[in-house]
Amino acid sequence: GRAIVREPKLFLFDEPLSNLDAALRVQTRLEIARLHRSLKATMIYVTHDQVEAMTLADKIVVLNAGKIEQIGSPMDLYNKPGNIFVAGFIGSPQMNFIEAARLGDSQAKTIGIRPEHITLSRDAGTWKGKVVHVEHLGADTIVYLETEKTGLLTVRLFGEHKFAVDDIVYATPDTSLMHRFGADDRALG
């Protein structure tokens, strides 16, 4: 409150929500967003919580061991990660990473596919696998399966789905949303 009265041009938030419980965290996040819009001041917000970064930022600077990995809008980082570190940091659950050679791609070292960009079927699909764990989260169902082609694969399905451990299923990635990374872990064009 004292900072707002002085009408500064810049605010610095250093992990302001880290000690709050989940409900208060959401409420305070909304208040900070509302404050940002009303004050129209620059705010630098430091956080390790990617949800806070994605929901509050106009622009995100992703740091790794003091090095800038990528700068961009939240959705640019989500849709076009510049390297494996950013691809793995942005998105929950984390992006699946598969050895490209296992999928027949000799140009890339690693293929990435987000869990929400994979569909599951009991009848047919790209990769046959066995369900090893299921998390029923209400709005989402997270299915972990083991396939010969990919190894462990995480799939995020929207809504409630009836999969159980040991079910045999088929996973199909949206190939237009796959990410390719080279030997240096940087995204390939």
Image (cartoon, rainbow, N blue to C red):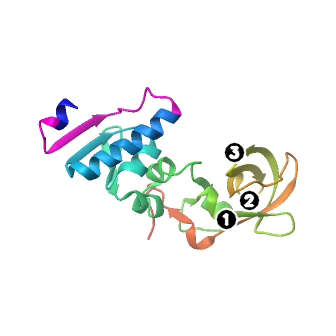
Name which residue type carries label 3.
Answer: Leu
Which residue is at a point 46% across and 35% down the rendered structure image? Answer: 25
On whether residue 17 falls in the magenta region, the answer is: yes
Who comes first in sequence, dot 2 or dot 3?
3
Dominant SS of magenta comes to: loop
Q: Secondary structure at mark 2?
A: loop
Please tell me the numbered disc located at residue 103.
1
Image coordinates of residue 35 in percent, x first then y, are 29, 45
Name which residue type carries label 2.
Answer: Lys
Please state, as top left, top right, bottom left or bottom right, where the C terminus lies in the image: bottom left
Which residue is at a point 23% across and 37% down the rendered structure image? Answer: 12
In this picture, residue 168 sits left or right of residue 135: right
Note whether 119 is above or below 69 in the view shown: below
Q: Viewer-nearest of labels 3 and 1?
A: 3
Please tell me the numbered disc located at residue 136.
none
Q: CA distance from mark 1 to mark 2?
A: 7 Å
**Looking at this view, is 66 or 32 the one in front?**
32
Please tell me the numbered disc located at residue 149.
2
Total numbered circles = 3
Which residue is at a point 40% across and 47% down the rendered structure image? Answer: 53
Q: Which residue is mark 3?
A: 137
